[in-house]
Image: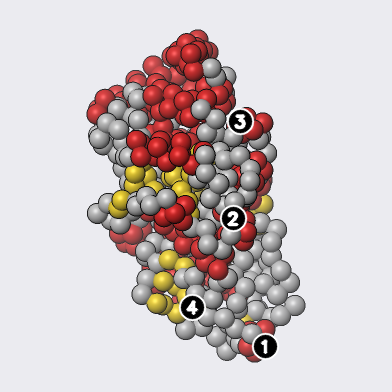
Amino acid sequence: MRKMKLGKQIFCGVLTSVLALSLAGCGGGSNGSYSKAADKKSGDTEQLTVMVYDRGNTTETYGSATKNYWTHWIQKKFGDPNNIKLKYVAVPRNEETQKINTMMASGSAPDIIYSYDSNLITQYGRDGGLVELSDLIDKYGANLKKNLADALPYGQSEGKQWAIPAKRSLVGWQTTYIRKDWLDQVGYELKTDENGYYHMSIDDFTKLIRQFKDLDPSNQGGEMYPLGMVGAWNATQTRPIIWSFLETSNLTDEMHACYDERFWPGYKEGVKYLNQLYNEDLVDPEFLTDTDTSYTAFNGLLSNGRTLAFAQDANAVLTGVEALYEADPKAEIVPFYLDNVNGEQFNRVYTPNGMYISIPSTCKHPETAVKYLDWLADYDNAKVLSYGFEGVHYKMDGNKVVTIPHTDEEKAASDDDFERLTVGDLGIIYNGAPYGYEDSTEGMDEVKAKSTQLAQESDKVATVGGQTDYYFQGIQTEADKKYSGLVPSIEDELPRLIACDPDKFDSEYDAVLDNYLKHDGQKIIDDKVKLFEKLEAEK
């Protein structure tokens, strides 16, 4: 195995074993709030234990998830100057919740833990298992306060800061896509808005969908299904089409927060529109049986040139698109949005936070843990963990990050490490780069370059009219706990509504609403309204 190298020195310090943590740590009190840090003599070496995901993807030359070039780099740059010994504790990614629960219950949790489950973290805080971070962030978290200003509120619950949420840089969720090369063929010019994003009216979209039913632009000879549907299991990825029918002026904050989307004004009309297109044979009927999460039927239609448009996740490299580009290098798919028929645009976007980072109350020096997280929040440090060293691993071309290619011989002769398999799990403060940089497509093959560019553009288009879901501060109502798994989900209902007899659509949709309410959905709504009113009154 290649030795880990840092600068021109071989860094081979071995980290000490995990300390048995005591529940009598510095958390203090039943609410886990910080009062006074444990005494530390000048010159004493502290140990700070930090959770890190083990994804099982490391190599012999990289090292392990806990001991590699980049953990040693952090030790040298943060640990050594501050007389702190860092120890990383591996947690299997697919066993995250179970492992954290076990460690928290036994008092052996690392000083820094994290999870994507906000309810889990908030409950630990309420139970006295976490350090309350407000004062610590004020004193030691200048970078955290400045760079995570819009994310930090998502770590609060009932006035307590139980977590430091990672900053999510890409918030686009879903958008629509279309074959621009085909539109060019028929002489249709996509409009652009003030940001240069493509958009289209519902009327134009409908005309194009119908027009392409009778065309064979790729000369495949197969039947065209112009509107692609990404599998019955995920028909909710048609939401960007449905959103274009929302009556946004009548969608109150309370309704947005507390009511299932099927009750939102205009949502029914959006689903009815899809039902209309389906019953005009403009949607592949096989989508109802396409329950494979690899989108087998949809990807086949797309790559074979038999689908004009579809809705899907934003900022994702789509398998069917890459297959299309392989089969037809002249194909050009672009993201666009449909103009809301009632005026104001609406699209759901992710909240600006990722995982929830917390400090268990068993931590002996929570101020050190916050200092470490603040060090990670410094942009200069975050850039290294995001991209490596400028001039070694990458160069800048405007706001594009261009990877510098090296031969195996150059890598072997260098003191710098080129494998970066789990570095993102060390730079936990940022979910994606927070600087507005994008990966350059320089040096990529044509298919990869086009797919990467599409992913970048789609995230931007997906933010038009973007609204986040209401933040309930990690509080789950009793009705939600009791009934949320029992009420029929809209994911299950949409395929049937899209494919039902159009003459029966209204009665079928009303039945879906009634069914939700009868399965205690009304109790879920009522409890959420009460919680919403309480939280709003406390602002």
Picture quadrant of residue 378: bottom left
Which class describes the residues within 10 Å of circle 4: few (<14), some (14-19), or many (20+)?
Answer: some
Which class describes the residues within 10 Å of circle 1: few (<14), some (14-19), or many (20+)?
Answer: few
Label ID, residue 409: 1
Labels 3 and 1: the sequence-earlier one? 3
Residue on which the image places disc 4: 394
User: For the residues marked 1 and 4, what is the alpha-carbon distance in whole angstroms?
Assistant: 18 Å
Total tally of numbered discs in the picture: 4
Q: Pick the quarter of the image with the N terminus.
A: bottom right
Camera-side residue: 46 or 280? 280
Camera-side residue: 196 or 423? 196
Image position of 300 with respect to 270: above or below: below
Residue at the (43%, 62%) spot, across then down: 433
Secondary element type, mark 2: helix
Which class describes the residues within 10 Å of circle 2: few (<14), some (14-19), or many (20+)?
Answer: many
User: For the residues marked 1 and 2, what is the alpha-carbon distance in whole angstroms?
Assistant: 36 Å
Residue on which the image places disc 2: 324
Label ID, residue 285: 3
Labels 4 and 2: the sequence-earlier one? 2
| Type of amino acid at the residue the image marks with label 2 | Leu
Camera-side residue: 213 or 320? 213
User: For the residues marked 2 and 3, what is the alpha-carbon distance in whole angstroms?
Assistant: 21 Å
Residue 184 percent location from the top left of the image:
41, 55
Residue at the (48%, 58%) spot, across then down: 332
| Type of amino acid at the residue the image marks with label 3 | Pro
